[in-house]
Image (cartoon, grey):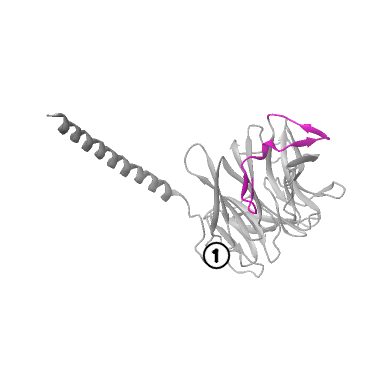
Amino acid sequence: MNRPAQLRRLALVVLAVLLLGGGSLGYVLHARHRDLPTATGDGSFGLAEPGLYYRDSATGRIARVSGTGGPPATGGPACERFYAAGERALCLRKLPGIPARTQALVLDRGLREVRRVTVPGIPNRARVSASGNVLSWTAFATGDSYATTAFSTRTSILDLRTGYLIKSMEEIPLTIDGTRYHAPDVNYWGVTFAEDDNRFYATVSTRGRTHLVEGNLHDWSAKALRENAECPSLSPDNTRIAFKKKISEDPASPWRLYVLDLADLSEHPLAETRGVDDQAAWLDDGTVGYALPGREGRASDIWSVPADGTGEPRLLVPGGSSPAAVNRRDRA
């Protein structure tokens, strides 16, 4: 066989390999895309209707119950963590494959996707500011429980006004006891935003202790306010913080819900005595909602309790998690 013929034959072989490889790659990509849950709702479900929005544990999708009673409204996106306020919602999903990755979907009031960000880790916490302009999410980079020390987190903040994304806030200048603090084991999680879209609160963990920190987006700084406060949630009037406080070394139930008065940093326990491992959500100025492990085989249930420490827990949504109260004056 002469050289031109050999070259033509080699070219045909290479072309066949490329075509076969491209077909296989296309199939793999198609299969991977096909396995992902639907990013948005069915078009008829959005945030226009006031009510309690939540993740339905049976379907993995967002649903809504209203104060007027009746069956839940369904048709929302598939999410593992969810929150909504103002003009935006945040949906966290775990992507398939190893290592674990979290996809954060920013949705409009029609629950249509407007932006997506992928970060390492397992979905854990989600929050949106009252205006909907600023969002934050936390993923477990390693581990999957705050009840042990063998975990690390990655917390991101996205400002939709500028489009600026902070993929990990670990490098924020931190002050503890009036002194600039540096340590390799600093972890942040559970951000909650004030009404001005600048001030925020979060948990920082270092050297086996947790602190409630107050942060400033404009100055990009954070200072510790007190110890032993996790997963803060700022009240609608911006005067109180619901948080979980460690009261026991029992890994099955180490925390209890408390409310902190920001005016004098006084605190009181809530009437919920069971261990709550959740970032509580304010349903109104006087009520806090949260998820607990479910009864009767359900993955989780949503409960509420008065924020002043009186009353008793009330079951709101069997089989629900990630509660977010949406009304005509949305709050973070």
Percent x, y for residue 93? 54, 48
Give the left or right position of residue 107, taking residue 201 as reference.
left
Percent x, y for residue 108? 58, 60
Return the residue found at the far front.
Answer: 4
Give the number of callouts: 1
Tell me if mark 1 has few (under 14), some (14-19) or many (20+) residues whose alpha carbon lies within 10 angstroms of its own. Answer: many
Residue 183: name its quadrant.
Answer: top right
Q: Which residues are magenta?
A: 157-184
Percent x, y for residue 304? 71, 56
Give the left or right position of residue 97, taking residue 55 as reference.
left
Of 306 and 16, which appears nearest the observer?
16
Q: Is residue 119 above or below residue 289?
A: above
Q: Is residue 124 magenta?
A: no
Instruction: Give the residue pinned by disc 1.
Output: 45
Q: Quadrant of the N terminus?
A: top left
Residue 251 visible in the picture: no
Residue lying at 67% horizontally and 40% vertically, measured from the top left: 169
Does dot 1 land on a helix, a strand or a loop? Answer: loop
* Amino acid identity at mark 1: Phe
Q: Quadrant of the C terminus?
A: bottom right
Percent x, y for residue 111? 56, 60
Of 203 and 12, which appears nearest the observer?
12
Of 242 and 203, which appears nearest the observer?
203
Residue 29: name its quadrant.
Answer: top left
Return the residue found at the far right.
Answer: 264
Residue lying at 68% horizontally and 39% vertically, measured from the top left: 188
Give the left or right position of residue 291, taking residue 213 as reference.
left
Residue 274 visible in the picture: yes
Of 141 and 272, which appears nearest the observer?
141
Q: Is residue 178 magenta?
A: yes
Q: Is residue 13 above or below residue 32?
A: above
Residue lying at 77% horizontally and 52% vertically, measured from the top left: 271
